[in-house]
Amino acid sequence: MRPAVHFWNKAPFVRLLLPLMAGIILQWYLQFNFDLLLTVTLICISIIVIYFFLSLVNRFRLAIVHGVLVNILVFCSGSILVWINDIRHNESWIGNHYQEENIVVAKLEEPVIEKPNSYKSLATVQNLFSNSGNKSVTGKIIIYFQKDSSLKSLNYGERISFKKSLQEIKNSGNPGSFDYKTYSLFNGITHQVYLTKKDFILLPEKDISFFKSFIFDCRHWVLKTIKSFIPQKKEQGLAEALLIGYKDDLDKNLVQSYSNTGVVHVIAISGLHLGLIYWLLIMITRSLAKNKKTAFIRLLVIILCIWWFSILAGAQPSVLRSAVMFSFLAAGEVLARRTSVYNTLALSAFFLLCYNPFWLWDVGFQLSYTAVISIVAFFRPIYNLFYCKNKLVDMVWKLNAVTISAQLLTLPISMYHFHQIPTLFLFTNLVAVPLSSIILFGEIVLCILSFIEPIAKFLGILIQWLIWLMNSYIEKFDQFPFSIWDQISVNIPQTILLSACIVFLMYWFMENKRIFMWSGVFCLLGFVFIESLNSYQKSQQHKLIVYNIPKHKAIEIVSGDEYMFIGDSVVKQDKQLQNFHIIPSHILFGLKDESAFSCSKEFIFQNQRILIIDSSLNLKPVWKKDSIDQLILSSNPKIYISELHSVFFINKLIIDGSVPQWKAKLWKKDCNSLRIPYHDVTEKGAFVMNL
């Protein structure tokens, strides 16, 4: 037990971080009453204060009680932080006051971003005007502007007013799809609106923060510099993403190649970039570590440079989180404090979660910390497996050791979120990591020397060639049929068991203690048992799925791991539509093969009579009506619900995403009057029925 006790003593913030995380998670899913949390918190604080006035002997006797109270206090603090940060609990939140007749005044929080069919901007609602007066409100919305060249110049700080109805952000509801509503809510965004040029008025007064304006100006200047000296679009897009995380110019196929080969972290501005800069700063300022006076100067230089780069990169949340983490690491390293790295990491995570508890669900937050912890814990044992006299070979092995150690703890999280394992990540990281580091440093030098045009042009050509080389290397590996193991579906218990298995087996490898080996084997057996149970359940499944894909028909009949698709050919041919709407469902339900059978628009499946109507019919009332279990209306048929009701007994009517909204509204009104149960996928999400 000594090593465990030693670890807890050396890393006290780990002990505080765990109850904070528990409070955050349980509050979000269970929604404890705020008054109850506040009462328990005040009671704990009162008892802890009394505890410190007790005699030393009594404090020693009640040490366990004190520890329990501290953990309860931190737990409640985490829950209270979630309650406070949930925009819906704010009395002035727009959702508590907005009505359709209101005039909305909003401020753009960023320059408009060009999308394929519109311009997009994040905005903050400031006021609601109605006949009864003016109401100050708060809340973020997403505004989609009509794609008009005159609207491209809309910038940060512009204030607009409009009367068009705000729409609450909703999920598509397709099985396994990304929970965009919760993601937006975590960022305080709850509504959206589409505006044409005639729908809004640009107000004369601007509302600008000097700091945010400075960030956007820096970002604009960097983008302008890169576009001036790196003209090729494909290389230019990656250069922008690599330096400041700007992804709007990235080639989508290139991003997929980087993802498939396990090096997408290279173009996702995060801990890797700041880690490289941190390492470079530590090396450059090593001479200042000789005495205490210059050590503080060294710390100041490192922290200023880290935060300067963070601001240059647009001060995005993922970058700021990494900046905080490396600032804490720098303080421990530079000031030569004999503290545990785990304690420093826990302290930075504690600080970040106190600022925004919803970052706990952020994939970047999870991967950043697990990667650093994994490297700290496992790099040295893995590196010591081989001894290389040759410095070049040693450097290559060291890079591979870092890559392997980082992958160990991030693997279960990547499997859970991204449903894939890149099988060639060692070979791709071996080139991509050092080459992207050189490119990153080259881009920083390019920005610094951009005013010296001959040097800047030379650097631009060199950087463009290096990016082309890296892209070609990654795309070549992506062409291998075995480059990725995809469509992996694991749940949260499996993710926890696999992570525990890796930790136990690695400690067995390092400590050679059988207890760790058996613990790892037990976790692995638990993982396999859950996977076997899931596989059996999926082999017995029978489902009807009507997807929510705007303007498209997409229906699937599922039997075991096979499915039969009924819908628009566009959906089958468009990879983007497939990846966004269909593939997540296939991963969730373990669907592998498309059935070779086809069916008509009326068929029986698992004793359910299903009818699909996607064209106009000439229906006449009959004396004996047929019974239809599931009637699916699709496309834009000229038909009335009353006509259908005169011919069929309808147990359930389903309106898919290809039906125009105006027609769906009329059909739903008729269904209500005729008491026919219905399901509109655009309103309630995809229709999924177990048969």
Image (spheres, rainbow, N blue to C red):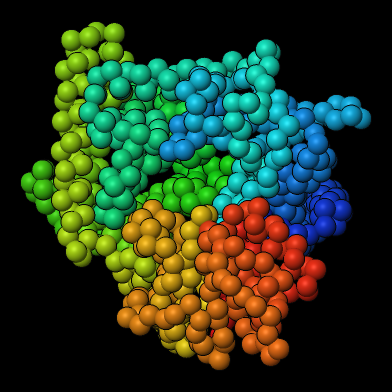
Q: Which residue is drawn at 59% across and 15% down?
A: 210
Q: Nearer the viewer, residue 165 or 236?
A: 165
Residue 524 in view, yes or no: no
Q: Position of residue 685 (x, y in %)?
A: 60, 62
Q: Quarter of the image for the C terminus: give it.
A: bottom right
Q: In this view, does 605 lie above or below 215?
A: below
Q: Is residue 222 above or below residue 426?
A: above
Q: Where is residue 309 in the image (x, y as percent from the top left)?
A: 41, 26
Residue farthest to the top, as pictured:
452
Q: Residue at x 73, y 32 (%)?
A: 163
Residue farthest to the right, as pictured:
132
Residue 562 in the figure: left or right of residue 160 = left
Q: In this view, does 347 lie above or below 427?
A: above
Residue farthest to the left, as pictured:
390
Q: Which residue is drawn at 25% across and 35% down?
A: 234
Residue 121 in the figure: left or right of residue 80 = left
Residue 261 in the figure: left or right of residue 657 = left
Q: Position of residue 371 (x, y in %)?
A: 39, 51
Q: In this view, does 565 lie above or below 518?
A: above
Circle count: 0
Q: Which residue is drawn at 56% across and 71% down?
A: 617
Q: Which of 375 and 636 is in front in this view?
A: 636
> On the image, which quarter does residue 158 sit in?
top right
Q: Where is residue 277 in the image (x, y as percent from the top left)?
A: 34, 31
> On the image, which quarter does residue 503 sit in?
bottom left
Residue 567 in view, yes or no: yes
